[in-house]
Amino acid sequence: MPTFRNLNDYFKYVNNGLIKAMNVVGGKAKQHMYDYVKKEMESRPENEDVYKRTWEYLNSISRIDATLAPDGSIETMIYYNTDLINPHITTDGTLYQHMDDWGNDVSDMIPLFMETGESYLTSNGTRHHKPVGGIIDLEKWAKSNFKKELINELKKLGIQTK
């Protein structure tokens, strides 16, 4: 660890290290969620007559880089970026994806539908499916791994922690 002229320089050094470490851990968490959701989706049969996967749901998993919050905490966010999920109509016009039965765009709701197992209201009632649970799995991963991963990354930067 370098030497510091004053306490303020030390705090800057530690905070920058925390941000760098959190970015690495956040990247690992995002990758874990991506891998989990991909495995869940691949384990389920795809019925070509009803739904052809676009993989936009999976590829919408995103992360905001770590920042120092006003309260002094370091945070990063992993989320489904619904701007990356779009409605589609198949070339023959018979299949609507990320749309309800009336042609309304429901792409903003796809992560909720996939996570909870509840699908949107259709002309035949509500569709249900097995929840994917990517967010729940990510929470379990964070509870089991976050502290250890952050400590390892801080040690790599020369910041000793317990």
Image (spheres, rainbow, N blue to C red):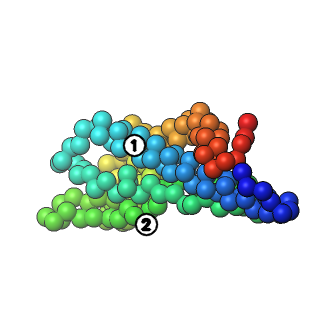
Side of 98 where 26 appears, left or right? right
Helix, strand or loop at label 2? It is helix
Quarter of the view holding residue 108: bottom left
- Quarter of the image that includes the C terminus: top right
Residue in the foreground of this view, choosing between 134 and 143: 143
Amino acid type assigned to the residue bearing label 1 in the image: Asp
Q: Nearer the viewer, mark 1 or mark 2?
A: 1
Query: Which residue is at 52% across, 46% downward?
Result: 29
- Coordinates of residue 2 in the picture (x, y in percent): 73, 55
Query: Which residue is at 67% across, 48% downward?
Result: 158
Side of 158 where 116 appears, left or right? left
Indicate which disc residue 83 carries.
2
Q: How many marks?
A: 2
Q: Is residue 154 above or below residue 148?
A: below
User: Residue most toward the front?
Assistant: 3
User: Looking at the image, can residue 123 be seen?
Assistant: no
Side of 23 where 51 appears, left or right? left
User: Residue most toward the left?
Assistant: 92
In the rendered image, which residue does mark 1 sit on? 35
Q: Is residue 155 above or below residue 108?
A: above
Indicate which disc residue 115 carries.
none
Mark 1 and 2 residues: CB-CB less than 8 Å, in contact? no
Quarter of the view holding residue 90: bottom left
Query: Which residue is at 24% across, 64% downward?
Result: 89
Amino acid type assigned to the residue bearing label 2 in the image: Asp
Mark 2 closeness class: few <14, some 14–19, many ≥20 residues within 10 Å: few
- Coordinates of residue 41 in the picture (x, y in percent): 33, 42
